[in-house]
Amino acid sequence: MSDPAKSLKAVEADMQSGIDHLVQDFHGVRTGKASPALIDNLDVYVHAYGGVQKLKSLAVIQSPEPRMLNVQPFDPSTTRDIEKAIRESKLGLNPVAAERSIRVPIPELSEERRRDMVKLIKTLAEEAKVRLRAARKSGIDEAKKMKSDNILTEDSLKDQEKDIQELTNKFTKQIDQLASTKEEDLMKI
């Protein structure tokens, strides 16, 4: 890329993508309420048809009751595989398979389980910050390349690096706010 403004926009888009990914991950961290996003967004993988498939490509996930999810496989022969994948996921759920569907009761969160979920939130937030730092490094490397190609002057390079750091700070603050809000939501009884 030979345009500093376009390069900065690309860095911002990469960082926003990291935030969007984090928001999707947070939807999958349960707060004691049944939501299809609980198992849909965390990419539960199922060993079926001789390979690995995403759960959402094999079934419809619904929430018929506040504390219950219902997973309806498109192909009933995958019911046991889906049940196993949900049971082995990091969510700590205990699905019950019927002939053509899987009921997933959502238990109340104990204090210990809430703390485990908070640790998961902090881990997800840190992973998002790593993505931000990678986008920042990529943007700074691009700016240095433009400097070496005589597209940017030394002062312009410093300005570009400063703008990239400001974006990084803005998105880091956003990640911290999202994590804090999710933690508060989880710790409510």
Image (tube, rainbow, N blue to C red):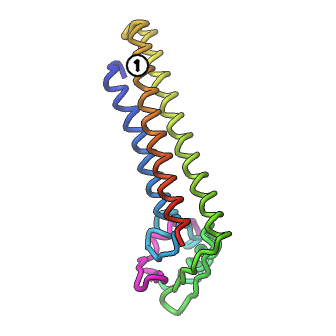
Q: Quadrant of the C terminus?
A: bottom right
Whether residue 86 is situated above or below residue 170 in the rendered picture: below
Q: Badge 1: how crowded within 10 Å, few (<14), some, or many (20+)?
A: many
Q: Main secondary structure of the magenta part?
A: strand
Extreme-right residue of the structure: 112
Location of residue 79 in the rendering, given as x and y in whole percent from the top left corner: 54, 83
The amino acid pointed to by label 1 is: Gln
Tell me the magenta residue range.
50-74
Tell which of 97 and 188 is nearer to you: 188
Determine the image quadrant of residue 174.
top left
Location of residue 121 in the rendering, given as x and y in whole percent from the top left corner: 57, 56
Residue located at (42% from left, 80% from top): 63
Location of residue 155 in the rendering, given as x and y in whole percent from the top left corner: 41, 8
Determine the image quadrant of residue 89.
bottom right
For residue 95, side relative to residue 136 (left or right) = right
Location of residue 30 in the rendering, given as x and y in whole percent from the top left corner: 52, 69
Asked which secondary structure carries label 1, the reply is helix
Reading the image, the residue beneath label 1 is 160
